[in-house]
Image: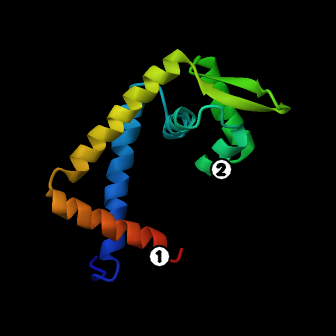
Amino acid sequence: MDLGTEDELIEQIFQITRKERQFIQQTLKQHGLNIMQAQALNFIAQHPGAIQKKLSVYLGKSEATTTNIIKILEQRQLVVRRLASNNERQKQLYLLPDGQVLVQSVHKIFIDLEQRVSAPLTATEKNTLLSLLHRISEDAAF
């Protein structure tokens, strides 16, 4: 059924996002990770010592869900929670050596994805598309 072009932009974004998720899920699965676990590892790598609440906000998940994600990563000896020196109730998150190695592998997955997505574009087209997407992201009313 042809609904016209009123939703063509949204449809294209949806299709790209769907393909992107499939690629990411399949590739992360090879490393024994799901998307949330990979995002948690990446956040901890970028914010060593961050508390769990900040990770919850970043992931857009409840603190209970974030706790479950962290527990799995701890069991795999990828992350560790340590008591904050200034607050015994808060635990800070750190990557363990295996977690650091895995984060680098995950980062390579996203670099590969970036290259696949931008391959059909010239550098100028990529910069134009990025500029337009940033504008949409900042100004669109959701």
Location of residue 137 with respect to 67 vertically, above or below:
below
Q: Name the residue under label 1.
A: 139
> In front here: 72 or 127?
127
Residue at horizontal 38 percent and vertical 40 percent from the top:
24
Q: Which amino acid does label 2 sit on?
A: Val
**Residue 71 in which image quadrant:** top right
Place of residue 81 in the rendered image (x, y in percent of width and height, measured from the top left): 70, 25
Rounded to the nearest angstrom, the CA distance separating label 1 from label 2 is 22 Å
Secondary structure at badge 1 equals: helix
Within 10 Å of the Cα at label 2, are there few (<14), some (14-19), or many (20+) other Cα atoms?
A: few
Residue at horizontal 27 percent and vertical 79 percent from the top:
2
Q: In which quarter of the image is the N terminus?
A: bottom left
> In front here: 122 or 22?
122
> In front here: 54 or 29?
54
Place of residue 6 in the rendered image (x, y in percent of width and height, measured from the top left): 33, 83
The answer to whether the residues at label 1 and label 2 have Cβ atoms under 8 Å apart is: no
Location of residue 38 with respect to 100 vertically, above or below:
below
Residue at horizontal 57 percent and vertical 34 percent from the top:
44
Within 10 Å of the Cα at label 1, are there few (<14), some (14-19), or many (20+) other Cα atoms?
A: few
Residue 110 tag number: none
Place of residue 109 in the rendered image (x, y in percent of width and height, measured from the top left): 34, 35
Q: Which amino acid does label 1 sit on?
A: Asp
Residue at horizontal 51 percent and vertical 22 percent from the top:
99
Give the residue furthest to the front. 86
